Amino acid sequence: MVNLDLYRVFYTVAKSGSLTKAAEELYISQPAVSRSIKQLETQLGVTLFTRTHRGMQLSANGGKLIFNEVEKALNLLGDAENRISEMKTSATGTIRIGASDTIFEYFLADKIVEFHERFPAVKFELLADFTPDTIEKLKAEKCDVAFVNLPIESDSELNLYGNCMRLNDIFIASEKFAELKNEGVTLETLKKYPLILMEGNTVSRKSLDNFFQSVGLEMTPSIEVGSWDLMKRLVTRGMGIGVIPREYVTQRLEEGTLFEVKTDVALPVRSVGMLLPKHKPTSYALHAFTEAFRKEY
């Protein structure tokens, strides 16, 4: 059986012309180098080197006969190792991401662009839907990773990484309701105003309803919407008071087209979480993309 280590020692001695230099390059002792050369000579039945005042020289009828072939073989092995290494550390293929339109816009868009700049060969397939439907797509293997609004029920098939992005729900209004700019508006006071809330099947609405129930209030919306963008438009036109994560309305607050209604009781903080299947192999591309989110968790 071919012992590659012996040939690597032989090649290193031949290239350096010195047992001492070869030992330093290979991080082994000089006696270990000498033993390896003798073992290979015994195995091949020829003398591979001759000692001269210039150091170790390849023998005419031994070392010189095999040097070129050994060099080619080691180079081929090195190329093969490099290709395998590149395969493990180069992201290719397609990553299918499930999330809501809002999570894509306010949380994932910049991160996808940054990842694409690092790994331009990776393609993305973006599947926009509400959190419950996104979870079903992940379990049906229609997407590779999902980013969802929390809280959600635990699932034995999925790994959850929470707190990828904090969401601070706030009440918002337009100048039509300027009287609400006073500090410490009570929730009871807001019941008297038209409320614009997300649809009842959304995670954000369920979380809000649970909070209202916990403080003994029943808040009935005048309008239910299916997107945050529509809510912002209706609130801006004075149709009512909305509830939205501050992170999704920062620009309008800074512009002054909307203002935050500061209540005596703050709404609970929520977050965006990442879901991955528990028992599905992870490609290098997917691992590299999700690594930052796992670290944040």
Image (cartoon, rainbow, N blue to C red):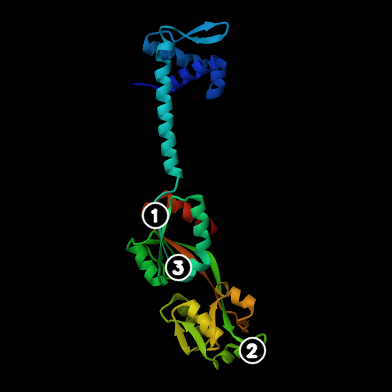
User: Which label is found at residue 148?
Assistant: 3
- Residue type, mark 3 in image: Val
Identify the residue under disc 1.
94
142 relative to 188, above or below:
above
Residue plotted at (41% across, 7% down): 61
- Residue type, mark 2 in image: Ala
Q: Residues within 10 Å of mark 2 (few under 14, many from 20)?
A: few
Q: Position of residue 269 (x, y in %)?
A: 55, 73
Q: Residues within 10 Å of mark 1 (few under 14, many from 20)?
A: some
Front position in the image: 46 or 83 = 83
The quadrant of the rendering that contains the N terminus is top left
- Residue type, mark 1 in image: Thr
Residue 207 seen in the current view: no
Is tag 2's residue or tag 1's residue first in the polypeptide sequence?
A: 1
Is tag 2's residue or tag 3's residue first in the polypeptide sequence?
A: 3
171 relative to 34, above or below:
below
Give the quarter of the image for residue 177: bottom right
